[in-house]
Image (cartoon, rainbow, N blue to C red):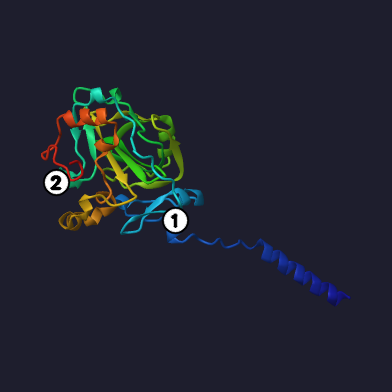
Amino acid sequence: MKKSWYSFSVILFALFLSGCQPQERSQPSDQQQTESTSVQSEKRQEASPEEKTASWEFDGEQWKAMSSVPSCPEPLVMESLIDIALVSSVLYPGQYRGGDYKPHGGFRFDGKKPEDITVKAPLDARLTLGSRYIEQGEIQYLLWFENSCGIVYRFDHLLTLAPAMQKLVDNLPQALPDDSRTTRFATSVEVKAGDVIATAVGFAKSQNVGFDLGVYDLRQPNTASKNKSFAKKHEAYQEQTFYAVCWFDLLSSDIAQKIRSLPAVGIEGKTSDYCL
């Protein structure tokens, strides 16, 4: 009887020790912790399953939808995202500026203050990627919006964001000088055409007022990419250069006409691989 009780006590003591041992936690793999993508050499957070099913991904050769997507409206017309009357000049997409090829364009507002400019969403979309970085001593914001049908628009050099946007970018990595690599948000923000995205743009210290706008049609490569010389020259960044479009053509005809009538900024003027 004593021997039996002794054996039972030993077993209980062993179980107690086993229960007190800290359980080893499985560590997430490198792929789970951070997932690299080719869009601007992004740093990305792992998205939720819901995010993945609605997103487009670049596989190194082409953009692919992660699930079935709706058809884009035909004709596809974006709403005006700014007060065109305030624009002094235009940056054309698809040209060299500052020694680098720029698939995006933009607007300048000479004589205006950063807070004079309000930027609105031109199309229903989700804010999926973002970056905050330091340039010329000021924090700048870059935001990437995806419409589920495959149209993307990208803003850069936003200075002051609308509260809903700011709440999301507050979770981005710390801003570093000239490091505009983007991060995929763990959750996205839905925006409707006409929603305010930013209430100030450009640089307050130097009063250099303007912002970049790029629009990309992920459904198929653009016409320029079919040119062998262009394709070879810009294949390193084909996720943007092969899918960028002339966003003038996606605005209403009267707005597009006003934009084309404005002076162009940059040494290449109105030369563009996308706007013919």
Q: Is residue 58 left or right of residue 260?
A: right
Q: From the viewer's side, name the closer residue of 226 and 176.
A: 226
Q: Quadrant of the N terminus?
A: bottom right
Residue 203 showing in the rendered view: no
Q: Quadrant of the C terminus?
A: top left
Q: Is residue 29 left or right of residue 227?
A: right
- Residue occupying image coordinates x 45% and y 48%: 54
Q: Tags 1 and 2 in contact by the CB under 8 Å rule?
A: no
Query: Residue 106 at x, y = what percent?
Result: 23, 35
Q: From the viewer's side, name the closer residue of 12 and 194.
A: 194
Give the residue number, with chain letter if any, for mark 1. 33
Residue 34 showing in the rendered view: yes
Q: Residue 240: give its label.
A: none
Query: Residue 27 at x, y = what percent?
Result: 50, 61
Q: From the viewer's side, name the closer residue of 264 and 183.
A: 264
Q: CA distance from mark 1 to mark 2?
A: 35 Å
Instruction: Identify whether 38 is placed above or below 92.
Output: below
Is label 2 in a helix, a strand or a loop? Answer: loop
Inspect the image, locate mark 2, and give the three-letter code of the amino acid beneath it: Gly
Give the residue number, with chain letter if any, for mark 2. 99
